[in-house]
Structures are given as C-alpha cells and as structure tokens.
Image (cartoon, rainbow, N blue to C red):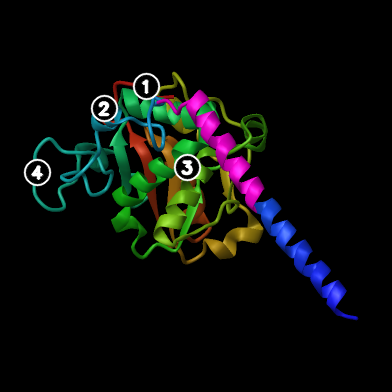
Amino acid sequence: MDAEPSLSRSLSSHLYSALATCRGAWSHAAKLALDIALPTLCVSCREPVEGEGVCAGCWAKLSFIAPPYCPRLGIPFVYDPGPDMLSMEAIANPPAYTRARAAVRYDDVARTLVHALKYQDRTDLAPAMGRWMARAGRELLDGADVLVPVPLHWQRGWSRRYNQSGALARIIARESGVAVAAEALRRIRPTEQQIGLSRPQRASNVQGAFKVAPDRQHLIGGRRVILIDDVLTSGATVDACARALLRAKAAAVDVLVFARVVDGKRTPI
C-alpha cells in the first residue's frame, strides 16, 4: 500500500531535478547569449575584454606602487634613500594615522576605474581593485584587527545606493581574513564635495564630521584598525577619520586606498 506514495515521491523528485537542470541550462544559455550580444568592455578604452573590466593594455598602463616608498605615507621615492627614511611631507605634516599604502598612482586609467566604481554602479570592478589593495597593504593587514570603510553621510549614501569604500573593504576582508566593521564609523554631518578645495579648506570641510557610534566602540577600542578608501588626495578625510577612531581608543590606525595622488598637482575627484 505504501508503494504508490513512494513511487509518487520518487517521480516528483526526478521531475524537480529535471526542471532544475533545465532552468540551469536556460540560465547559462541566456547569460551566454547576453555576453555575445553585449560583450564586456574595458572600462578605460572600451575595447572588448574578458574578465573584470580592464584589458591587458590598460592594465599595463596602471602604475602600481612598489618600494622604495615613504614608510609613513607610502609616497614612492624616485630612488632608494635607505631604510626608514621619511618623505619631506611626512616630516612636515605628520598625519594622525600611522601608515598609508596605495595600490596604484592616481593616473588616467586609475581615475577611470575609481569614477566607474563610485559614480557609474560598476561594482564588478571592486573584486580586482580590492585584490590589488590587499596585495599592496599586506604588511598592514598582517596583525590588523578590523577594517573600517570611510563612511558616506546617509543622504549621499541614499542617492548613491552603496558605499564604494565598503565594497572594497568586503573584498579585502575576503582576501585577508580581517573582519569589516562597516557601521563602526559614521559621518555625522554632511560635507561639501572636496573637489576644487585647497588643502586647508579640505581639512576644515571634514573637521568633526566623523564619530564612532557608541554601540560600536567595543569593535574599535584597543584594536589595530585599517581605514579603507578609494583615493587619497590631501589626506584630510582619512586624517579626520583616524582622529575619530583614536578618540574611540583604537590602538593604531593605518590607511589602505586603491589610488593616491603622488605629485599633488591634480585633484582626482
């Protein structure tokens, strides 16, 4: 008497499996057709590309930052001045954070990548950019306790729909195993865009704009924190963030960005 229900369950199981297989095949076929109809284009030169948005030619144009560089600010040196030699900028204007590292110089290709991620919803670029950052910041990530993305004010986050620094932080966390405290640091007041502002104006613009949430201080106190952002220009924003984290009793604050302005002549964003 139990054979018929058992047979029915078996047939249902096989039918569900067959339907799932068909759905998978149709999904794969649809994706293939879409890829053929709309091939992925290099975000910089718009040539068709396989992978994560950057063709081999544009990848070769990226200027990756490698030693020798200032151990404090990560600014590349033209020649090796010897161990522990600080840049003039680090000596003249020491930041609140301990060390900063960047994956690449802020050049034309890097600018296109940053703007595509930040303003054009190209979140597909975050994995490659985050992996490059993880490699560049390996010495910072060793021994770090938590990653903190530079936050947007909620009004800007609402209009932009996501925080590009948070997207990069999640990739770096996956690569390094260091946890992300996405809401630990908050931008408590809206700030003007830094575009076109002088160094003093940038510092004034973000002064007092950041605070560690009281219910998240346990994630920061006594911990080695790495701030994550897309671009480092004058350093005013990450410096203000670092001061807020240090007020919350962080043991140390380092900075890891995708790109940094090296010559100081161009304002990136």
Circle 4: residue type: Asp
Q: Is residue 263 above or below residue 165?
A: above
Q: CA distance from mark 2 to mark 4?
A: 29 Å
Q: Where are the magenta residues, as a range? A: 21-41
Mark 3 to mark 2: distance in Å?
37 Å
- Whether label 2 touches label 4, CB < 8 Å: no
- Mark seen at residue 240: 3
Question: Magenta stretch: residue 113 in it?
Answer: no
Q: CA distance from mark 1 to mark 4?
A: 38 Å
Q: Amino acid at mark 1?
A: Glu
Between discs 3 and 1, the one toward the N terminus: 1
Tell which tag, 2 or 4, sits nearer the viewer.
2
Seen at 56% across and 25% down, the residue is 192
From the viewer's perspective, tell me whether residue 90 is left or right of residue 9.
left
Location of mark 2 (residue) = 57
Work out whether residue 250 or residue 25 is closer to the camera in this orientation and state it: 25
Badge 3 element: helix
* Residue 124 percent location from the top left of the image: 49, 37
Where is the C terminus found, in terms of image quarters? top left
Left or right for 6, reference 258? right
In primary-sequence order, the first of circles 4 and 3 is: 4
Which of the two labelled residues, at mark 2 and mark 4, occupies the earlier sequence position?
2
User: Quick check: marks 4 and 3 in contact, CB under 8 Å?
Assistant: no
Frontmost of labels 4 and 3 is 4
Residue highlighted by disc 1: 47
Mark sitting earlier along the chain (1/2): 1
Count the labels in the image: 4
Identify residue type, mark 3.
Ala
Closer to the chain start, of discs 3 and 2, is 2
Q: Is residue 24 found inside the magenta-colored segment of the image?
A: yes
Magenta segment, principal secondary structure? helix
